[in-house]
Amino acid sequence: MSDVLLEFSNVTMQFGGVTALSEVTIDVHRGEILGLIGPNGAGKTTCFNVITGVYSPTSGGVLFDGKDITKLKRFQITRSGIARTFQNIRLFSQMTALENVMVGADTHKSSSVPGALLRTKHQRHEEKESRDRAMELLTFMGIADRYDSAARNLPYGYQRRLEIARALATDPQLLCLDEPAAGFNPAEKQELNELILKIRAKGYTVLLIEHDMSVVMNVSDRVVVLDFGRKIAEGLPAQVQINPDVVAAYLGVPDAS
Amino acid sequence: MSSLLSVFTKFKVFFLDTFGGLSEKWYSLTKNQRYSAWGLVIVAVYLAPWWPKLPVIGWIVNTPGTNFESVLTDQVLIYVMVALGLNVVVGLAGLLDLGYVGFYAVGAYVTAVMTSQHWNLPWLVALPVAVIVSMLFGLVLGTPTLRLRGDYLAIVTLGFGEIIRLSAKNLEWLGASRGISKIKHPPSFGPIKFGVLDAKPYYFLALTFVLIVMFFLHRLENSRVGRAWTAVREDEDAAELMGVNTYKFKLWAFAIGAGVGGLAGAQYAGKVSFISPDNFPLQLSILFLACVVLGGSGNMYGAIVGGVMVAWLPERFRNFTDKRVLVFGIALVLVMVFRPEGLLPRRVGAERRKSKAIDEIGASS
Amino acid sequence: MPDWLVIRTFWDLTVTGLAFGSIYSLIALGYTLVYGVLRLINFAHSEIFMVGTFGALIASTQVLQIPMLESGNYPYRTGFTLILFLLVILISAMLISGLGAVALERVAYRPLRGNGEPFGAIVLAFLTAFVLSLLFVNNTKINLVIALVFTAPISVGYLRIFRKGRQAPRLAFLISAIGASTAIAEAVAIWGPKGREQYQTPRILEKKTLFNLFGTDVRIDYVIVVAGALLMMISLTLFVNKTRLGRGVRAVAQDAETARILGVNVDLVILVTFALGGVMAGGAAMLFTLVYDQSRFNIGFVLGVKGFTAAVLGGIGNLKGALLGGFILGLVENYGSAIFGGQWKDVIAFMVLLIVLMFRPTGLLGESLARARV
């Protein structure tokens, strides 16, 4: 079992005249928390979209656990072990919190219409499994008290955590979090940090897009920096923070005069 | 003016209170009490042909000018069955199907062909074949088209419905414009005779089928399949990324919807004994869709209510005969303007148990 | 069949196919405009077209007082008079269809967008009162009186209970459109000048052959239809691309919220969109009566389906697509009829649509009024 879980190799992503990603290479190691940062429009979410199969890369490849996933359908990629959350929350608003997570848990289930119609033993067993796993995850994320509420009625913090619970329910090896701290106050951000560490402690690998430095720098083992679709820096949080290219990317270069 | 407004508000409150309160009361019953309640309701519905004989309810329910039992069988239950099937496609999976009459027609024509036109088989044999063939048509239609986005699916399904009708009209093999007659009735057994005059046996049979379909649909809804459909309807892309094989489940929705439509068609053919392409116009697809949306799409009981309303109301109000269709059109607009989620909207989880009326009253006071 | 006969038939079919197709194109424009801007299938557009044909009828018989005469004795006009009469009929049809479309939007769609306003409330109140009065008596004059009496109070109530700011689900729009479509057609059937009968429009254009193309006689009315459709398409495209209001239309089609923030009067844009669609339908209606000399309360339905098919075929939301889709549909119908027989015409048209959509899911020219949303 190789140390590198995800090999994002030399990926270029072009949309018509726009180059969103240009020869980006990122290696995600098993069990690590990798932060992906960069100014707005740098291409971070595009990376997620390429990894999860929303986009097909113009060139370059993505290997997950040694296997090429660029030709797989999206749900197959999820089944292979990659799960994600979304920058703007995309919960199933008309389902309860529990049902949302159960959809994730259903990923690896095999029973379908005949099983449901006949309520076979197998189907009933799988239903119970999904339900139990979903409750477990809701409890783990600290939102089990609202398990029966419609997702659209949940407070913002709960919704964000619900998305993570749903992603975890698909039993991934790699969890991709897209700006999970957006809209949080400092206390909530602290809780989120602890949560991400707890998740990693359970054995998941985490790829994290975040703007908030107090989250990314405190939680990541390593950090990759993108700017205008290119990787401009990579390394330990402390190193990256003082990297002049990174600083320039965020703050701009001072005028020569 | 303000007194009129307060009348409005009082009426709205009363309406919401009654309906909202119902669901609250329902969930406060124990499981055994619920089963008994269901039992009572089912018995009462089986006795529907005799409702016009009751005092007050009889007057409300009866259809002057037409035979009440015929209305129940030929229209109400057919529409209810169809609404149940279409609800799976449109309400649960969120697929815009404007050609559902096609599956209905397939069911009817398969029955007709097998019992009258080309073979001489009994209706009971034709029935499962009709359902299976309809499902196959659903698969055949769905396979290439379910990759299309919602609104395109609408026109394609509309075209499909028309293709079925026009094929029936132009193919000698299917009776062409003349149609097919002498379709066999369901088999009579014991005291229950399926003849020409008495609609009651057909009613009991149709009602039984409706209950069976409801039972199985309920199982589907509360399973992984139902969740997958809702997820697809809510946000298909997110569903896919959460591991749902959206294509497969959309096909299933189509096939099941088609099968139920075919079942309705087979029953219809078995009762009226004569069908022709004119029985399956595009307008019927639209009417079917109206049943689902009017009643509350995504909600099985809403679909039933919608089916009942669309089938029964025009008959109940036959006294403005020439303007019935006009009134129907206006009513559709009015309901959509003021209650677009339908008469019995879908409630989720805890909402079902709490009375929404209480919230709404609080909000508007 | 001898070769020259086949070729002659081919050009015959082509010419008539393009002529009929033009009418489909114009109807398609209405669907495509509204869809492009609002993502809404305006199911009632077909009735807007039908109402336009009645506008043409009323203009020719009532306003212009053209007598309805029999074949061989048509009240032909020529030269300047002809052009003037045709213009009057055209403008009447466009006016009625345009106004109808705007009214339709305010009554059946706007309240569902959470934007209900007085005109819609009044009309809905009137209709409610009318329908309720029918429960008691079925006499149009009495119903009208009762309805008028109760319209005011009910409309005030409606304005209060309109759901401001809350958008109804997409299906609700469709059903509302269907209801409106049904109601308009029935209203014309019940109270219109000809009831449910087919009626003739007086023929003032002598359908001479204008010229000969590859052995086919090209009639003047065909030429007018195709030319008229092209002209209207060009004007519409110019409007959308060159004028400020047209830019607003394109902006709202791409992103309504941003357009609103940037100061575009979204309500005006929507009004203009519907009005333009209606005007195009009115043009189609006038050309339709020119070629067919007849109409009926329920022609909207069939032509609406064809128009919508044409719009999807060309790429819904795409103006040029509507034109292309209409022409192709007209041609396919003709060729299909010739090869397989007239009764299969519609089946072939739908099959073609299905095949096109399978290979180009967003229609032949794709969606371009706004970027395609996946």
Image (spheres, grey):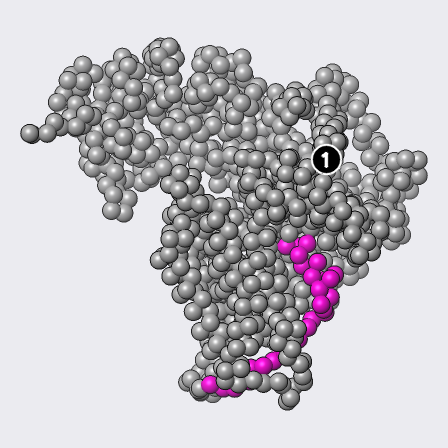
| Amino acid residing under circle 1 | Met
The part of the image, by quadrant, that contains residue C60 is bottom right
Residue at the extreme left of the image, as rendered: A257
Residue identified by numbered label 1: B1
Residue C196 in the magenta stretch? The answer is yes
Q: Position of residue C100 (x, y in %)?
A: 59, 57
Q: Is residue C76 visible?
A: yes
The part of the image, by quadrant, that contains residue A74 is top left
Residue at x 58% of width, y 41% of height:
C116
Q: Position of residue C195 (x, y in %)?
A: 73, 66
Residue at x 75% of width, y 31% of height:
B3
Residue at x 87% of width, y 43% of height:
B62
Residues shaded magenta: C181-210
Nearer to us in this view, C169 or B210 = C169
The quarter of the rendered structure image containing the N terminus of chain A is top left
C92 vs C113: above or below: below
The quarter of the rendered structure image containing the C terminus of chain A is top left
A124 vs C296: above or below: above
